[in-house]
Amino acid sequence: MGPSIIVLILAGAIVGGATVLGAPVFAVPVVIVLLAIWGALTVGRRVLGRERRREPIRFGPEDRATLVPSPSPHERAANRRRSAQDARG
């Protein structure tokens, strides 16, 4: 990121200096425009990279065998009682 910004600043200084002799003030708007374009391209690349369609997650028989089953209503009630007792101290 650092070297590309330096290149953009140098390009803006050269273009601004060449536009009007003795007026490097024009380099600042050129650098701002170049940085805006560079930033838009960078953000665009990131956004497009994230929006690629990924394959859906598929669970096989081995995966299903390792999933933890949900607790039964009796186990849930026991867990709630245990939590309430732990909260009381």
Image (cartoon, rainbow, N blue to C red):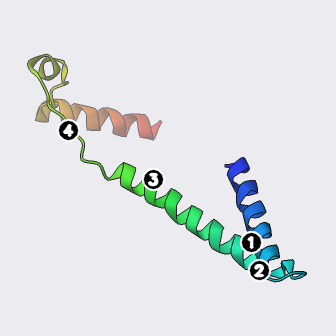
Label 2 sits on residue: 19
Distance from the alpha carbon under mark 1 to that under mark 4 = 47 Å
Query: In this rendering, which labeled residue sits more in front, label 3 or label 2?
Result: 2
User: Quick one: label 3 or label 4, which is nearer the N terminus?
Assistant: 3
Side (left or right) of 5 relative to 40: right
Indicate the amino acid at tag 1. Answer: Val
C-alpha gap between disc 2 and disc 4: 52 Å
In percent of width and height, residue 71 lies at: 16, 30
Q: CA distance from mark 3 to mark 4?
A: 19 Å
Instruction: Work out whether residue 80 or residue 49 is closer to the camera in this orientation and state it.
Output: 49
Q: CA distance from mark 1 to mark 2?
A: 6 Å
Mark 4 lies on residue:
55
* Residue annotated with mark 1: 15
Q: Which residue is mark 3?
A: 46
Mark closer to the chain start, 1 or 3 = 1
Amino acid beneath label 2: Thr
Give the residue displayed 38% in from the left and 49% down from the top.
49
Helix, strand or loop at mark 3: helix
- Residue 15, compared with residue 83, is above or below; it is below
Along the viewing direction, whichever of 25 and 78 lies nearer the viewer = 25
In the image shown, does 86 or 13 lie closer to the viewer? 13
Could you tell me if the residues under marks 3 and 4 are in contact, i.e. CB atoms within 8 Å?
Answer: no
